Amino acid sequence: MYNYFFTLATLALKKLLNFHLPSLTCLFEEKLVPLQTFLEMYIRRLTYLLLVLCATSVMAQRESLDSLAHTLTLDEVTISARRRDEPVVPVQTLQGERLEALSTQSVADAARYFSGVQIKDYGGVGGLKTIDVRSMGSNHLGVFYDGIEIGNAQNGTVDLGKFSMENIEQLSLYNGQKSEIFQPAKDYGSAGTLYIRTRRPKFDNNKRYNVVVTMKGGTFGLANPSILYEQKLTDNIHFSANTEYTYAHGRYHFRYRKVMPSGLVAWDTTAVRQNGDVNTWRAEAGFFGYLPDGKWHVKGYYYDSEKGIPGAIVNNVWKNSQRQWDRNAFVQANFTKTLLTGYDMQVNAKYSNDYMRYLNPDTTLMYIDNSFVQQEVYLSMAHRVKMAGAEAVVPTWQASPLSWDMSVSADYQYNTLDGNLANFVFPERHTTLVAAATQLYWKYLRLQASVLGTFVKDKIHQPTLTTPTASAQKPQFTPAIFFSYQPYLKEELFLRAFYKRIFRMPTFNDLYYTDMGNISLLPEYTTQYDGGVQYDKHFPKCLLSDISLKVDGYFNQVKNKIVAIPKGNGQYRWQMMNYGYVEIRGCDINASATFALPADVCLVIAGSYTYQKAQDFTDKSEITYGGQIAYIPWHSGSAIANLRWHGLGLNYSFIYVGERYHNSANIPANYERPWYTHDLALSYDLELRQLLHEHKHSLPRLHFALEINNMLNQQYEVILNYPMPGINGKGIIKVIF
Amino acid sequence: MHNRFFLLVVCLSWLVFSLCSCRQEEQINSKEQEQHGVVQVNQVAGFYLLNEGNMGSNKATLDYYDYSTATYSRNIFAEANPSVPKELGDVGNDLRIYGSRLYAVINCSNKVEVMDAATCRRLGQIDIPNCRYMRFSGKYGYITSYAGPVEINPDYKQRGYVARFDTATLQIDATCLVGFQPDELEIVGDKMYVANSGGYMVPNYENTVSVIDLKTFTEVKRIEVAINLHHLRADRHGMLWVTSRGDYYGHPSRLYCVDTATDQLTDSVMIAVSNFHLDGDSLYIYSTEWSYIEMDNTITYGIVDVSTHEIKTRNFITDGTDQQIKIPYGIWVNPVTKDIYVTDAKNYVTPGTLYCFSPEGVMQWSVRTGDIPAHFAAVEK
């Protein structure tokens, strides 16, 4: 019954929007239709639309509950529903074909295409990769996996290189927070948020299962098979399981070369990157359930890896032997339901257990064999009440009637860390987060405001004391306000601005790491001011069919920045202190154009550009005062050109990172040259059914892809002394049953 | 029509950008020169300053100050040795001149770089893992190393050693096992003293000085002094001054005195020592101690008279410049003019500063150095 409505509704909507609307808009554009006729048509269609919406209120409900609108796979619907929310908070999204065309190996590789983002990449398949949004530091980015944050209470950093792009459906990066008030309190708790969404089961027509078998292989000895299995257990319960194995020996040639001022070669040396091997196994399984007025989702995740840490390449040392083992496991669940008309509730829960072992087996150095276990328990409840007005899902070309929502959410989180270090204090942390938010849509105006209260209590077990010591951080209340305005109804032009103040708590390492931690640390604050404009336009029946432009200017401050200060007597002894102060002035630009060329050729060109002036204003007496902070280029950007013809796709992408310094002392000795890579990927989708002119459903679809990365074989480093791979390639075969 | 034009503009601008963005080749580091101080002509021609560079940064660099022209030259190694890949290396730990040669111990590059003391040209290298400090006697050079013999044994604790190399061949011909993680060493007559730290064994630090008979090159004795020993210096009265880093908790850093005639611990001075320099009977000391109460470093600049074992001053910087120095890291005194040189390593990752003080403790000049300026070697005519 339910599915029947779903199919019916989507078909109807597709028909309406796809066939009638573009022509309608086009006619309107060219002013060929008298306004009255247009309005008549418009109202008629709108009534039809409303009828459809009513008939499928079940579906619409689900739609509204999930702002990302993924259950409706038809783009037309998705877009009109999604755009309602989009401009309130600046968002960048990579999904679907565009994401697949980029053919990136890890989440970090894909995130490079976002503007305002700097990636810290230590190179290779298994190298640490973190991202830094708008120069506030990677600790200020919240990373959410299928809706729930991935925590790291130990050091606050999430290694995005660990998250493979296999089975990832969508990546969204929000500055500030997600444009949604019906969410857990944690979602308000970071200066920037990255949402990683894995594929949800969806079934064509009468299919009850999907199987996708993928094999990737390439340079660095990469062998990366994976299997996805999805089953429609009942109409309302879907099951999905996915597993992946990654092996790579991780060796690649790198070359260092310097020239004399005269241009003559001073030295030129090539070596092989060693100890970069990776051996990883990942498995995920989940159930997705749909209720009349809600949905639920339970998933388990397991990741097990052993890898070499290739280390810094310095004079006389071309090989290192450190190893790292990780084992991450979590189970998480979400339950969302409309309890009464205008009252929604969701519950989220998670338990995670992360093990990490670091080994330095080199006895000429300090022998180290440390292991740590982190555990996290997380519970969250969020409520939303509609105070006034109707459902917010209204097409963009219509002014919103008044719609006012309020929400309250409360989260509780418990973290522990065990380790085998000397004088370890086995910290525990209780965090309570309470958020209140409101959202107002009225005519051309959208407004969102939230306030987050954070209450943190730590407990440590001093080796000398029998009873644990408790300490509480001062309660923190941090606001955020987002605003967007659409000056012309018929144009998708939005002006927007936001202000957000948030902080990151000192991590367990900052506070309690043996000898280095500082128990009296305060949170590190960020304040963001952003103003921007977004414009989208569709030109029907034109060669240039769509354009989109987003421009944002911002000013950020990072106060009480937690930095390591040398202490005392003896080498490499540090103390964590609230010391730094950084100001960031920047501008992010995203533009894209879609061309509907003759002969069914579709061309998409997209570009992003980032300007950042991120200055260290910590100490007036130092050479670093006013200097551009480490590894932040003034100019960076990316460009993508994607050409598609039937099943054939060609994707070109370019990443540019301009000159920078590896330290905020901007002197020639710290200068880092710009680097840029050109990547090319060719893909082909083959429908065996069509090829063989048979109509058996059992015949699979095939997908082939070949990619060449860093085509010009540029030798570069993102981080000083960590050489990146030169030209490299990958092949992918995917069989979809 | 305008669409085609748009497409053309996109393609053209791309082409222009691609052509313009040709990547420049990376040039070797050129030395930078600045004038500081006044010209001095005496038997000290100048001094080298070795900047350690933070671990993993490969930024150990050499600076040189020339008294005859009052010129400070920064980062001179790469220009003097343009064909050496990856320059001087990672973490400089000691710098010595012996004969006509300059030796730089580069800890994380596992080598001693051997250069001509006049030109800084590279003559060769001695490979030795995790090397720390060096001294010379006769035709031999001696280097301490944290790296013990490589064994596969889970309970293995690695003892350090002293390696002996022939200065003519630059080959290591003998090693002598000492305590855990040996740091500085000193030669007095036919005996060598080695400060064992045990720095990798926290909290079970070493507390002994090893005594090695140079003739047989074997350890003959251990002298119990204090935990976590670091520097050693012999004075002209037959005393060996030994520093203990302490354990950074209950045991503070201290200065100890060992009589080399009896090899007995004879005295201690109530002053913390991070590093020192002995000139005549004056032991110039600085110390940086972390205070958990003030959450800051307490810094002392003292002079101990080695003939009387008394502290002459606890602040030899008299003009208030000490307030500007964040982390003093290197110290040296010109044997002729008695000018005092102190370096500031700041936060270890940004360029440091070298300060020159008059014997009265008044700042004469200061100059920017490389990262973590630390070790001096005087060039005498």
Image: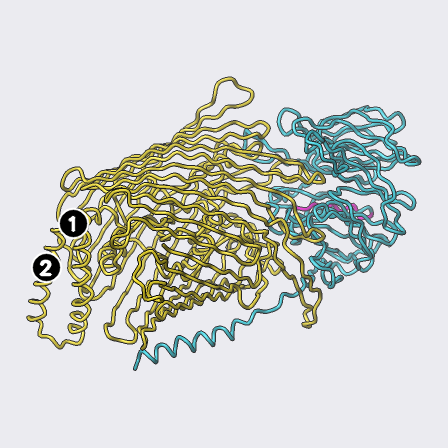
Report which residue position mark 2 lands on: A48
Q: Is residue A192 visible?
A: no
x and y percentages locating residue A78 in the rendered image: 25, 56
Q: Look at 43% across and 31% down and name the residue there.
A: A415
Tell me where residue B379 appears, x and y as whole percent.
Answer: 82, 52
Q: Please indicate, yes or no, whether residue B269 appears anywhere in the rendered image.
A: yes
The chain displayed cyan equals: B
Host chain of mark 2: A
Location of residue B230 by image quarter: top right
Above-or-below relation of A235 to B21: above
Q: On the image, numbered disc 1 is attached to which residue?
A: A391
Q: Is residue B341 magenta?
A: yes
Where residue A310 appears, as percent x and y from the top left, is 61, 49
Q: Residues within 10 Å of mark 2 (few under 14, many from 20)?
A: some
Q: Chain A colour?
A: yellow
Q: Which residues are magenta?
A: B336-344
Compared with A507, B46 (above or below) is below
